[in-house]
Image: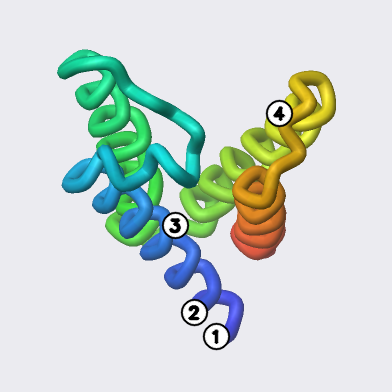
Amino acid sequence: MFIQILHITAAVATILTGLVSLLKPESVTGFTGLHPEGGRGITEIRAVLGGFFIALGAFPLFVQSPIAYMMLGVAYLAIALVRGVSMFVDKSVTQSNVISLVVEIVFGIILVIP
């Protein structure tokens, strides 16, 4: 039961991250380092950081399948792996990147636990 609560919490946090990006795309620039140029850039933040994250978080809640939560966890771990390598390759070990990396690893581990 406790792990299910953690799964739901991670999925809801994913949705909330998406909602912020969708509804207030300019607000994520300081944390992400992304600085969109014009409408096209704003649309990209809304679509990928917004819509995609909302769908990633909502699907496991909708289907209530352990494999759906696991897939979300694998996605978080893949993002963490790429971010971790990229932080050193790109010399971007910043506070926001470290926070994101920790959250991705924690959510990833929580979500892959059946």
Q: CA distance from mark 4 to mark 2?
A: 27 Å
Q: Please report contact status of discs 1 and 2: CB closer than 8 Å, yes or no.
A: yes
Using residue 74 as the reference point, say whether residue 89 is left or right of it.
right
Circle nearer the viewer, 3 or 2: 2
* Circle 1 residue: 1
Residue in the foreground of this view, choosing between 111 and 91: 91
Q: Earlier in the sequence, mark 3 or mark 4?
A: 3
Identity of the residue drawn at 28% across and 16% down: 37
Q: Which mark is residue 65?
A: 3
Using residue 66 as the reference point, say whether residue 101 is left or right of it.
right
* Circle 2 residue: 5
Residue in the foreground of this view, choosing between 56 and 21: 21
Identity of the residue drawn at 21% across and 14% down: 40
Using residue 24 as the reference point, say whether residue 102 is left or right of it.
right
Query: Considering only vertical position in the picture, is 4 above or below 81?
Result: below
Amino acid type at mark 2: Ile
* Circle 4 residue: 82
